[in-house]
Structure formats: C-alpha cells, structure tokens
Image (tube, rainbow, N blue to C red):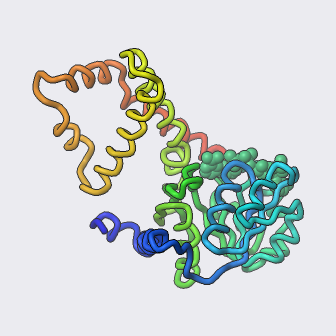
Amino acid sequence: MTNFYRKYLGFCQNDIIMREKFIFLNFHFLGDSMKIAVIGAGTIGSAIAKALAEDGHEVVATRRQIEKGLWLEKFGVRLSSDNKAASKWADVVFLAIKPNKVREILEEIAEFIEKKLVISIAAGIPLAELKRFANARFVRAMPNIAVIVKESFTAYATELEGKDLATVEGLLGSFGKCLRVEEEHMNAITGLSGSGPAYVTVFLEGLIYGGLRAGLPRDVAKLASLQTLLGTAKLLMETEKHPAELREWVITPGGTTIDGIFELEEGKIRTALMKAVDAATKKSRLLSKKL
Ligand SMILES: NC(=O)c1ccc[n+]([C@@H]2O[C@H](COP(=O)([O-])OP(=O)(O)OC[C@H]3O[C@@H](n4cnc5c(N)ncnc54)[C@H](OP(=O)(O)O)[C@@H]3O)[C@@H](O)[C@H]2O)c1
C-alpha cells in the first residue's frame, strides 16, 4: 500500500485491499450483510445496487418504470416502485434520484427513514438541505460512473463518526476508492471526478481520432488509447509522481513527444480542462438553489 493511500484513504482503502484479496480468493464480502434500498435505479443507481448486491448485501432498488430495471434481478437486486416500503424495510437508504426530485422523495419517505443512515449522491444538494426534509443520519456522497466496474472515485461528507463511518466506508468501498472530504469541497468533487469520466471520454476520442488520422486500424487506435490512459494512471498512482515529473521521462530532447506536446500547448488543453471543471462546479453549486 502506498503512503498516499495510508495517509488519505484510511479504512476505505483497507477495505479495498481486503476486497482485492477476496476477489483473488473468489470471495466478495466478509462484513455484515445489510438491507439496502436504492431509491432511483437509473444510470448510477443501478450500478450502485448491483455493486452492493455483489458484495453480499440485500438490495431493493426502486424506480417508477420497473420494467427498465428488471435486468438487475439476475444480480440479486429486487425491483420495486414503492419507495415507502423499500425505505421502511431498509437499514440504509441510498438516494440516487435527480437533484430536483430530492425534496419530493424525502418528503415521501421521511417517516420511514427517521434516524436511519441515508446516503445521498444527488449532485449539489448540501447536508443542511437534506436535513430540512427528514430526520435521518445523512451522508452526502459523489461517486462516478466507474462504479459499474468498481473503480469509482467516491468522495463523501458527513458529520457522522464512529461505527457509522465504518459502515459508510464499507459501503462506498464497494464502488471503488473512497475518501472523506470537507463538505465545502463536494461541488468541486462533482465538477472534477463526478463529471470527470465524460471529460476523459472526450480526451480519449481525440487520441483515437489521432490514431485513425495517422492510419491505425480502429481497434488498434482504441486499445492503444485506452491502455495508455490506464497505464499512465496506474503508474502515477503507484509511483506517487507528479504528472509533470512523469512527462519528463517521456520527452526526449529533439524527439517525437515534444512535437506532440507543442501542439497540445497551442490547443490550450489544460485551460480547457480547468474551465470544464470550473463550469461543472458552478453548476453543482446552483443545483441546491433549485430544490
Ligand atoms: N450519472 C452519473 O454519472 C452520476 C454520477 C454521480 C452522481 N450522480 C447523481 O445521481 C443521481 C441520478 O443520476 P442518473 O444519471 O443515474 O439519473 P437517471 O438515470 O435519470 O436516474 C434517476 C432515476 O430515478 C428514477 N426516479 C424518478 N422519479 C422517481 C421516483 N419518484 N421514485 C423512484 N425512482 C424515481 C428514474 O426512473 P423512473 O423514471 O423509472 O422512475 C430514473 O431511472 C443524480 O442526482 C446525479 O446528480 C450521477
């Protein structure tokens, strides 16, 4: 385990390391199985429900159009359109509906989640707003779509401590890596890692098109681009190097890479990415005002 993980990821990372061992041994989960309701089995709610069920929890996922979520049943997730019954049954409730639905849903299930652990992943909705509508033990979390492959970066903010924190980290650890942050950082997290997979796909598409322009077959261009991204991220994680330091390992004076970097600088790629994160962060801040 690297120092970075030791320092910042604490229990959650321990959980991941344990899970890796379990995957190696063909086990999934060794903690207490919990009863979990995922309200809003859409794009990310489904991924969350599946990840939790695969880790040995009992999961009920809700949405109005149940037929669209039935594929989850083969992973052991039960589908329902009854938010109240699911919330009453559950030990822990995930809120995975759109931000503009949070108020309506909380008002609907308030009496059934009293004092329960409720983890909201709705972008932009602060803990203070959640608490206005129900008396629950709230956590505000922001995963990303890589929950599907259990490689999400999930940041969370909460005032809870002790056993609750261990429970939260155990659950969010099912999605990938997680980290507790101050709530003031949650909008920026939303703009960076919540939306991040979308930015990365734009970047990847550019690389793939570059490969095609240079005459590579489609599948070669795609694999070369994806593995380069994966390998670079892994290298930076494991060596704890700053990206600038790694770049110097690749750039040879008068070589090929510096010509590529020169073009990137002209395209102001860093400015574009910084502006993207900034715009999404600002939008996240605005969402709470629309509750
Ligand atoms: N997508 C991401 O990558 C991502 C990442 C991090 C966080 N988030 C957050 O996750 C939340 C969901 O995003 P999403 O992209 O997954 O949206 P989504 O695909 O639209 O999912 C929302 C789901 O909520 C269900 N729903 C709506 N009204 C409901 C009700 N009254 N009771 C039960 N379910 C209801 C909808 O299904 P029915 O129409 O069938 O009811 C829909 O499938 C948002 O707050 C977003 O900020 C998303």
Q: In which quarter of the image is residue 53?
A: bottom right
Q: Where is residue 74 in the image (x, y as percent from the top left)?
A: 74, 61
Q: Position of residue 216 (x, y in %)?
A: 39, 21
Residue positioned 38% across, 40% down in the render: 227
Residue 241 in the figure: left or right of residue 8: left
Q: Which quadrant is the N terminus positioned in?
A: bottom left
Residue positioned 39% across, 22% down in the render: 211
Q: Quadrant of residue 259?
A: top left
Residue 203 in the figure: left or right of residue 5: right
Q: Position of residue 143 (x, y in %)?
A: 56, 55
Relative to residue 99, is residue 132 depicted above or below? below
Does residue 12 appear anywhere in the picture?
no
Q: Quadrant of residue 122?
A: bottom right
Does residue 237 appear anywhere in the picture?
yes
Please count the marks in the image: 0
Q: Nearer the viewer, residue 164 or 221?
A: 221
Q: Which of 182 and 265 is in front in this view?
A: 265
Q: Where is residue 63 in the image (x, y as percent from the top left)?
A: 83, 55
Residue positioned 69% across, 62% down in the render: 49
Relative to residue 270, is residue 129 depicted above or below? below
Residue positioned 84% across, 63% down in the render: 107
Residue 278 in the figure: left or right of residue 115: left
